C-alpha cells in the first residue's frame, strides 16, 4: 500500500514553517500543525507514520491526516492561518441590556421572605419579570461572575 499523503517542502516553505513554529505570537494549534508537517516532510529524510506523528504531538490520527490533506489541497498559507470564526458558533443568551437588568436585580433588595439573593432565586425572578424567556442557573452565575459580583 503506497503513501498517498506526502509532504515535500522547498527550502523556503520549510523556513516559513520553522519561523511560524518558533514565533511567540503563533497559536498552539498552528504550532501543532507546523510540527505535523515537519514530521511528515519527505525532503528531510524518511517521514514518520501518521500514527507516530499523532502520538508524538498528542493528537488524533484524523487531525494528522486532515492537516496533511489541507496542505496538499489548499497549500501552506491555508494550514498556517489561525481559524477565526466571524460569528461565534452559539449566539450569547445574555446580551448587554439583559445583563444590565440582571445586575440591577442582583444589586437590589431580595423579595420578601428572603434575606439575600441566590442564583436559583435570581433565575426564577428573571423569568418571572420576562427579562429573558428562559435562562439556566449557570448562565446567571457566569454573568454575575464576569463582573465579580457576589451574592453574599
Image (cartoon, grey):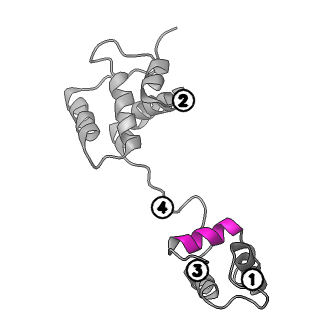
Range drawn in magenta: 137-145
Q: Which residue is mark 4?
A: 86
Residue 62 is tagged as 2
Residue 142, image x and y in percent?
59, 68
* Mark 1–mark 4 distance (CA, rounded to whole Å): 34 Å
Q: Residues within 10 Å of mark 3 (few under 14, many from 20)?
A: some
> Helix or strand or loop: what does disc 3 sit on?
helix
Relative placement, left or right, of 48 versus 148 is left
Side of 28 relative to 136 (left or right): left
Name the residue located 52 percent from the left edge and 26 percent from the top edge.
61
- Mark 2: few/some/many CA within 10 Å (<14, 14-19, 20+): few
The label on residue 74 is none
Answer above or below: position of 152 versus 52. Answer: below
Q: CA distance from mark 2 to mark 4?
A: 25 Å
Label 4 sits on a secondary structure element that is loop
Residue 1 on image: x %, y %: 52, 8
Q: Which residue is mark 3?
A: 99
Amino acid at each position: 500500500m503506497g503513501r498517498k499523503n506526502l509532504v515535500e517542502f522547498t527550502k523556503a516553505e520549510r523556513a516559513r514553517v520553522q519561523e511560524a513554529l518558533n514565533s511567540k505570537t503563533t497559536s498552539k494549534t498552528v504550532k501543532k500543525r507546523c510540527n505535523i508537517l515537519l514530521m511528515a516532510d519527505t525532503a528531510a529524510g524518511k517521514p514518520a507514520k501518521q500514527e507516530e506523528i499523532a502520538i508524538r504531538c498528542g493528537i488524533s490520527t484524523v487531525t494528522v491526516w486532515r492537516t496533511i490533506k489541507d496542505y496538499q489541497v489548499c497549500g501552506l498559507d491555508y494550514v498556517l492561518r489561525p481559524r477565526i470564526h466571524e460569528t461565534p458558533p452559539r449566539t450569547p443568551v445574555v446580551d448587554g441590556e439583559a445583563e444590565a437588568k440582571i445586575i440591577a436585580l442582583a444589586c437590589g433588595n431580595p423579595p420578601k421572605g428572603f434575606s439575600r439573593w441566590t442564583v436559583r432565586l435570581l433565575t426564577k425572578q428573571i423569568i418571572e419579570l420576562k427579562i429573558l424567556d428562559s435562562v439556566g442557573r449557570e448562565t446567571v452565575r457566569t454573568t454575575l461572575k464576569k463582573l465579580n459580583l457576589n451574592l453574599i
